[in-house]
Image (tube, rainbow, N blue to C red):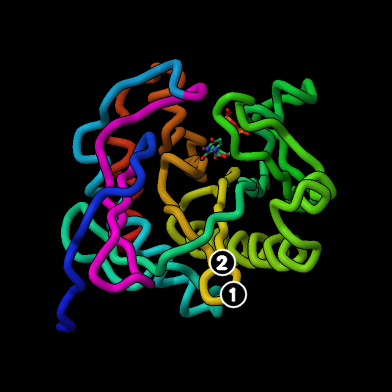
Amino acid sequence: MESAPQKREMFYEGKAKKLYTTSDPDLVIQYFKDDATAFNAKKRGTIEDKGVMNNRMSELFFTLLERAGVRTHFVRRLDDREMLCKRLDIVPVETVVRNIVAGSMAKRLGRQEGESLKQPVVEYYYKSDPLDDPLIYPEHAIEFGWATASEIEQIKSLALRVNQVLKRFLDERGVLLVDFKLEFGRHKGEILLGDEICPDTCRFWDKQTRQKLDKDRFRRDLGGVEEAYHEMLRRVES
Ligand code: UDP
């Protein structure tokens, strides 16, 4: 086993993760917390062992994606709650891919949750807590210098590729990939997939029953939150 660079100081604390610098300036440690928030942190709670499950699930998804040719920030999992990653200069745009109508799309456009989309829809949101992450056009990101036109093009094609790979993998495990959010960043001039991929950032439904296996159980007080995360991990590990 390669020796891990030494953990130095925390330089960022978000809602679900903390980031630490390391003795290697190109690498950071991502620490996964159990804290759960929803509706821009207006609702708060904890989900027992969420950090452990999201760390492991993200490791499995990033490994799968790397094998499929998607470059990510993932280096390796260090322990239960820590993952070694390449340091990114984050593009302040959240990319959402949708296969089935749910959440904000259902609400904004007056569509029934559960309606299948003929083609995946890619949306972009500006990462801003004070503005509640508003929906944007890619042109806004280019205009305001959040990303170049070429970066937006790469992000869109990477997001659709991630969708293809995850959708197929999950389908084989009896799970519908409803929608998900991705974050990208620059590392040595290259756009890499960052952040995490887990039930906090994706909507997963059981293919047969359409039971929710993701953070909507927490957001909507449906109960069985921990059980849903465990069930998703069990399926992804199988
Ligand atoms: N999402 C996320 N972080 C956010 C907003 C959304 O990870 O800050 C994910 C969410 O889990 C879902 C997808 O992005 O899988 C689409 O979310 P939506 O726009 O429907 O918003 P929500 O209903 O979560 O407010």
From the image, which quarter does the C terminus lie in? bottom left
Q: Ligand 1 lies in which image quarter?
A: top right
Q: Cβ–Cβ below 8 Å for labels 2 and 1?
A: yes
The residue carrying mark 1 is 190
Q: Residues within 10 Å of mark 1 (few under 14, many from 20)?
A: few
Q: Is mark 2 within 8 Å of ligand 1?
A: no
Give the percent coordinates (x, y) of residue 44. Answer: 35, 20
27 inside magenta stretch: yes
Q: Which residue is painted at 28% across and 47% down in the image? A: 32
Checking the image for residue 186, the label placed there is 2
Which of the 4 image quadrants contains residue 29? bottom left
Residue 206 at what x, y percent from top left?
47, 42
Magenta stretch encompasses residue 29: yes
Quick one: SS at disc 2? strand
Q: Which residues are magenta?
A: 17-40
Determine the secondary structure under disc 1.
strand
Residue 215's x, y, as percent?
Answer: 42, 33
Q: Which amino acid type is marked by label 2?
A: Arg
Q: Residue at x 77, y 39 (%)?
A: 136
**Camera-side residue: 196 or 65?**
196
For the point 66% across and 39% down, the residue is: 126
Q: Main secondary structure of the magenta part?
A: strand
Q: Which quarter of the rendered picture does the N terminus lie within?
A: bottom left
Spatial separation of the CA atoms under disc 2 and disc 1: 5 Å
Three-letter amino acid code of the residue under disc 1:
Glu
